[in-house]
């Protein structure tokens, strides 16, 4: 009760607004809103149900992948192979279904395989002390090879009846709903559990984390498992949405979009800080750009130039805001 | 047994690293409410001694006693279970986390329930109480530790050790790289902890004047041995300097 007047007073409101503007994701959010207005003025079809579905599908997979990559980036690791796991998962599910398992069980088998890939990455990185950049670069090629082998290089149809298909991607907004569920859960994990706090501590000061007795290896390996599993889950959702899956789906592009979403949203590439909400906002910005320019019919080559430049600009802006925030904190 | 309880005692500790003898038979004893200063050159064995007391290293020979009972400290966790906490030079704080998260690092308070969520409110409240109790001032317990001054950070590191029920507090150069005013804050903090009477403090230091000001007793270590021991009241910076100078003349 005592804090109520402070919040309602003009000065309290101003202070809260100021605090919001200093948050890394705030600038990205404002840029996204401006872009939405611009695209809507340029093409009135932007804010229609059909296009919002398309937009949400641009956003969903990178957000889910960003949830994992943000945890890894915070504890100073990265997973470059998550896009290949994304492509592998639907084929594992397809094979498990063909072998006689019901679709739901086949989904769990696929997720388990993804989790094991993450476990392998984690164990190689931690036990053999190979930097995760290298471990996952190797895994990137290895998993692509496995996917091409078991698919024989051909796309496959996604199994499943209408109910499962609609729940897991067939319905236009299904994917984004799952992505938002992942964001909500991972936000709570990062901000409100020991796991999240210890992930930040490991990235912020490894010596301090070790001296405090934090189980560093367990947390890092766990975050690798989490990222691979989320990557596989995103791949499954895409397969259900499209109805078929290509062995070269996802790949480095989707991994890069996931990492870029996190970094644009304020996750430090050097570790120690980041937010899941920031990853969501970053993915929305990238999705709005992608969808907006597609709607305007921009040439695909020009489009990559624009996206690349936009990512660079957003990252530079983010770093500058982070510096201002640090100075403001003193 | 003396009338004041002995907190920790080390007898004839030795430790070699390859061909280097870090400790060549060191014995020390520390009582509750007492503050011991450990002086000596780089390489005299001060850090090795502290690391044996914290369970980080194990001695090659010799015996440790906590509360008069012989103990073996196989790891930092085992030492911690005896109430032995060390505040290292590198300050074991996470800059990107708030003051209260640092105070509770790996000892977080959880809300009841299956989800095991962090109880931020309880940690904030307890952190504020704990800091007030030992007289540490920070602008806000929600502020990130990275935004604090060196002295404030050192105070938070000491406070964390005290919060975790330390009964034997080891400080590795608590006043290093600190301005005079900041050093005064830490000196006052150590004096307040000493006044509580239930904590034994041993600190490695370089500054003779400051050590004599804070500590009840000093030892001087040279080449892995304790070469001088005295109550601070019975010695002076001049005497300590003279011993060290004599040593240099012998070596020359």
Image: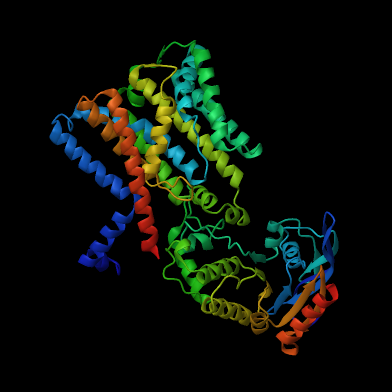
Q: Quadrant of the C terminus of chain B?
A: bottom right
User: How many numbered marks does the figure carry?
Assistant: 0
**Position of residue A62 measured from the top left corner of the image (x, y, whole percent):** 38, 33
Residue sticking out furthest to the bottom: B234
Using residue B242 as the reference point, say whether residue B176 is left or right of it.
left
Q: Would you say residue A163 is visible in this rendering?
A: no
**Position of residue A219 measured from the top left corner of the image (x, y, whole percent):** 56, 44
Q: Quadrant of residue B63?
A: bottom right
- The colour style of the image is rainbow
Residue sticking out furthest to the front: B252
Q: Above or below — where is B17 with respect to A298?
A: below
Using residue B186 as the reference point, say whether residue A281 is left or right of it.
left
Q: Is A324 or A236 nearer to us in this picture?
A: A324
What residue is drawn where x is 67% and y is 74%?
Answer: B206
**Position of residue B208 measured from the top left corner of the image (x, y, whole percent):** 68, 80
What residue is drawn where x is 70% and y is 77%?
Answer: B37
**Position of residue B169 measured from the top left corner of the image (x, y, whole percent):** 66, 70
Q: Quadrant of the N terminus of chain B?
A: bottom right
Q: Above or below — where is A95 with respect to B87?
A: above
Q: Is A32 or A233 nearer to us in this picture?
A: A32
Q: Would you say residue A208 is visible in this rendering?
A: yes
């Amino acid at each position: 009760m005592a804090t109520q007047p402070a919040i309602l007073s003009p000065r309290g409101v101003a202070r809260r607004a100021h605090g919001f503007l200093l948050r890394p994701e705030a600038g990205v959010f404002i840029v996204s809103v401006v872009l939405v207005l611009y695209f809507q003025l340029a093409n009135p079809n932007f804010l229609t149900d059909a296009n919002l579905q398309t937009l949400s599908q641009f956003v969903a997979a990178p957000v889910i992948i960003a949830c994992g990559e943000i945890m890894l980036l915070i504890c100073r690791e990265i997973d470059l192979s998550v896009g290949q796991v994304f492509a592998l998962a639907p084929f594992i599910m397809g094979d498990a279904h063909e072998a006689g398992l019901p679709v739901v069980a086949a989904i769990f088998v696929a997720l388990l395989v993804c989790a094991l890939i993450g476990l392998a990455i984690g164990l190689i990185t931690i036990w053999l002390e190979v930097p995760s950049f290298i471990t996952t670069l190797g895994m990137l090629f290895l998993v692509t090879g496995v996917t091409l082998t078991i698919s024989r290089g051909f796309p496959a149809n996604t199994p499943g009846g209408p109910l499962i298909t609609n729940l897991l991607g067939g319905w236009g907004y299904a994917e984004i709903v799952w992505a938002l569920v992942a964001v909500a859960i991972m936000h709570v994990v990062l901000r409100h559990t020991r796991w999240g706090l210890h992930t930040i501590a490991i990235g912020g000061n490894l010596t301090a984390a070790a001296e405090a007795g934090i189980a560093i290896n367990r947390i890092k390996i766990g975050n690798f498992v989490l990222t691979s599993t989320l990557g596989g889950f995103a791949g499954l959702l895409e397969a259900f949405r499209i109805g078929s899956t290509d062995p070269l789906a996802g790949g480095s592009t989707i991994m890069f979009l996931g990492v870029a979403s996190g970094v644009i949203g304020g996750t430090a590439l050097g570790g120690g800080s980041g937010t899941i909400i920031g990853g969501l906002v970053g993915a929305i910005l990238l999705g709005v750009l992608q969808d907006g320019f597609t709607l305007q019919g921009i040439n695909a080559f020009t489009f990559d130039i624009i996206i690349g430049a936009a990512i660079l600009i957003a990252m530079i802006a983010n770093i500058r805001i982070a510096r201002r925030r640090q100075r403001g904190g003193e | 047994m003396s009338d004041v309880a002995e907190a920790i005692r080390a007898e004839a500790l030795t430790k070699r690293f390859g061909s280097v003898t870090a400790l060549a038979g060191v014995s020390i004893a520390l009582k509750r409410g007492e503050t011991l200063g450990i002086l000596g050159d780089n390489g005299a064995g001060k850090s090795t001694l502290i690391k044996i007391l914290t369970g980080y290293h194990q001695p090659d020979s010799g015996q440790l006693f906590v509360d008069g009972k012989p103990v073996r400290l196989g790891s930092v966790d085992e030492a911690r279970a005896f109430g032995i906490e060390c505040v290292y030079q590198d300050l074991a704080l996470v800059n990107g986390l708030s003051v209260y998260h640092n105070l509770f690092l790996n000892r977080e308070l959880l809300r009841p329930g299956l989800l095991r969520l962090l109880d931020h409110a309880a940690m904030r409240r307890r952190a504020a109480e704990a800091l007030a109790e030992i007289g540490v001032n920070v602008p806000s317990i929600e502020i990130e530790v990275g935004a604090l001054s060196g002295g404030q950070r050192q105070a938070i590191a000491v406070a964390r050790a005290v919060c975790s029920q330390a009964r034997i507090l080891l400080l590795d150069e608590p006043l290093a790289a600190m301005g005079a005013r900041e050093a005064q804050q830490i000196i006052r903090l150590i004096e307040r902890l000493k006044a509580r009477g239930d904590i034994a403090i041993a600190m490695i230091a370089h500054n003779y004047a400051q050590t004599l000001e804070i500590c009840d007793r000093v030892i001087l270590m040279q080449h892995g041995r304790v070469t001088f021991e005295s109550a601070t009241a019975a010695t002076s910076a001049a005497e300590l300097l003279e011993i060290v100078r004599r040593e240099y003349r012998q070596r020359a």
